[in-house]
Image: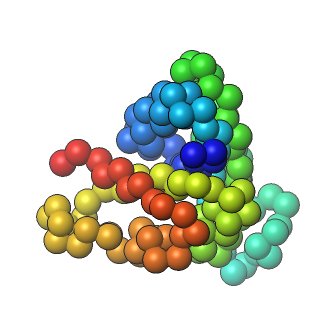
Amino acid sequence: MRTILMAYRGSEHDKRVLRWLCRFAKHTRSTLRLVYVLVVSYAHEVDTPEPPGVHEAEQMLLEAERLAQEEGVVIAADLVQAREVGQGLVSEAEEVEADLMVMTDHRKLLPMENPLGIGVVAYVMKHAPCPVWLCYEPL
């Protein structure tokens, strides 16, 4: 395994998974990359320089870099602007040639009622160019 891409949103669950992934990346000698997809509304161009939410997203990624440093890992963190989260994640996975994508989610239904989730999770599972690990929060 060479490149692990984590979809990062800055939640407490994301932080726990990031710490675990840092240890996993060290063990497997993999490169760990984070991506935060900032959804840009149709009121702005997708590549607008300062869309709403960009500063908060950058702060989350800086915090993630600090967490990784505490684990002894240097990560690459990217902010991707897109109309849809799923498309942004798949596009980034293709661009960095990810060998594995890791996502977190929380269950909206009973476990295994819809194991692939809905929305973003279902889109990524269907279109990702690499295997996807989905980490659910404990109930």
Residue lying at 83% horizontally and 67% vertically, measured from the top left: 48
Residue 121, quarter of picture: bottom left
Q: Position of residue 116 (x, y in %)?
A: 32, 70
Name, please, the residue furthest toward the right: 49
Q: Position of residue 107 (x, y in %)?
A: 26, 60
Q: Do we see residue 80 in this rendering?
A: no
Q: Is residue 65 above or below residue 85?
A: above
Side (left or right) of 22 relative to 58: left
Q: Is residue 33 above or below residue 115?
A: above
Q: Position of residue 55 (x, y in %)?
A: 71, 47
Residue lying at 58% horizontally and 55% vertically, measured from the top left: 99
Residue 138, quarter of picture: top left
Residue lying at 56% horizontally and 28% vertically, measured from the top left: 26
Residue 58, quarter of picture: top right
Q: Nearer the viewer, residue 32 or 41?
A: 32
Q: Nearer the viewer, residue 130 or 57?
A: 130
Name, please, the residue furthest toward the bottom: 42
Residue lying at 71% horizontally and 40% vertically, measured from the top left: 76
Side (left or right) of 39 relative to 96: left
Q: What is the total number of numbered labels drawn onto the structure image? A: 0
Q: Nearer the viewer, residue 30 or 133?
A: 30
Coloration mode:
rainbow
Q: Position of residue 36 (x, y in %)?
A: 62, 53
